[in-house]
Image (cartoon, rainbow, N blue to C red):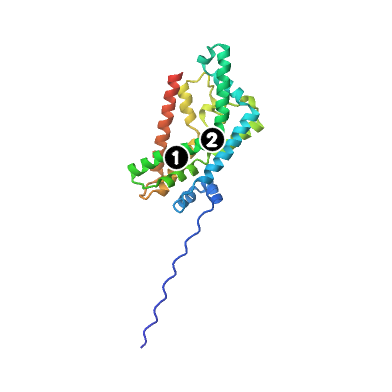
Amino acid sequence: MSAAPPMPPEPMPSPQPGLSEPARIINTFIAPGKTFEDLKRKASWWVPWLLICLIGIATHVTIDKKVGFDQIARDIMAQSPKVQEQPQEQQQRMVSITAASTKYGGYALPLFGLLGALACAAVLMATFNFGLQAEIPFGQSVAIMMYGWLPNIVLYILIMVSLLAGNPDNFHFQNPVATNLAFFLDFSTTSKPMYSLLTGLDVINLWVVALLGMGFAVNSKKKISIGTAIMVVGGWYFLIRLCLAGLAAIRS
């Protein structure tokens, strides 16, 4: 009796194609797990960084055209009793300096954004790697940071819409749209530390915290729950907000 012919080896499954950059951007908003999973394949970050910078600069230009940074500087100075005690010439000089630094500093958004992302990525990478053995490389951490920051373009768009469709006279540069509880309070009469804390309870910022937590959880070599990762990122975020509230208390 002849032996049965050997079975042919099973074909290896072909690797699934990765996401395109537009698909990564879209999925960050509708299915973020897919985007962060794809960062394991290719941890690129320049597309979300460029998108945030372009929309951010467009928002900055819109503010300049519809409100003007001289007016914004006067509004900022009016909120400081110490400035109001200065002679008129000194006040005008401070307004001019504040207007110029605010206006031209905004055009350095790409550089500031990149440096901020690198710093935050380093801190979170160290926290997850040393505290939770996540073993996430720095480049991957930067990519998580950039995609996690994408909800900021929603904030920029809301600011532009509010300026183009609403009354620019009601624009407040330091808290421009109603994404946090402090927006509904009077800055001049509210405790400055309380105002700062309530500003931190911002829908966009909390969205970013959730995305960053998911990104680090998905890319961790050691299994970390998304809830735990969000708590870690949230802990850093609220520590920063508490420090800002402390500074507000000192200045008030």
Secondary structure beneath dot 1 equals helix
Residue sitting nearer the eye, 56 or 176: 56
Q: Which residue corresponds to the image point at 33% horizontal and 42% vertical from the top-left?
A: 130
Position of residue 217 measured from the top left corner of the image (x, y, whole percent): 41, 46
Q: Which residue corresponds to the image point at 54% horizontal and 53% vertical from the top-left?
A: 20
- Location of residue 246 by image quarter: top left
Secondary structure beneath dot 2 equals helix
- Which amino acid type is shown beneath numbered disc 1? Leu
Q: Quadrant of the N terminus?
A: bottom left
- Measure how far apart labels 2 and 1 are at the Cα level: 14 Å
In the image, residue 84 above or below residue 195: above
Position of residue 240 measured from the top left corner of the image (x, y, whole percent): 42, 31
| Left or right of residue 92: residue 202 | left
| Left or right of residue 123: residue 147 | right
In the image, residue 235 above or below residue 28: above
Q: Residues within 10 Å of mark 2 (few under 14, many from 20)?
A: some
Circle 2/circle 1 CB separation < 8 Å = no
Q: Residue furthest bottom?
A: 1
Residue sitting nearer the eye, 125 or 172: 125
Position of residue 28 measured from the top left corner of the image (x, y, whole percent): 51, 46
Give the mark nearer the N terminus: 2 vs 1. 2
Can residue 149 be seen in this snapshot? Answer: yes
Q: Which residue corresponds to the image point at 54% horizontal and 47% vertical from the top-left?
A: 25
Please give the residue where the numbered disc 2 appears in the rendered image: 109
Position of residue 5 measured from the top left corner of the image (x, y, whole percent): 40, 81
User: Residue 228's mark?
Assistant: none
Q: Which residue corresponds to the image point at 62% horizontal and 25% vertical from the top-left?
A: 170
User: Residue 118's mark?
Assistant: 1
Q: Residues within 10 Å of mark 1 (few under 14, many from 20)?
A: some
In the image, residue 171 above or below residue 236: above
- Which amino acid type is shown beneath numbered disc 2? Leu
Can residue 162 be seen in this snapshot? Answer: no
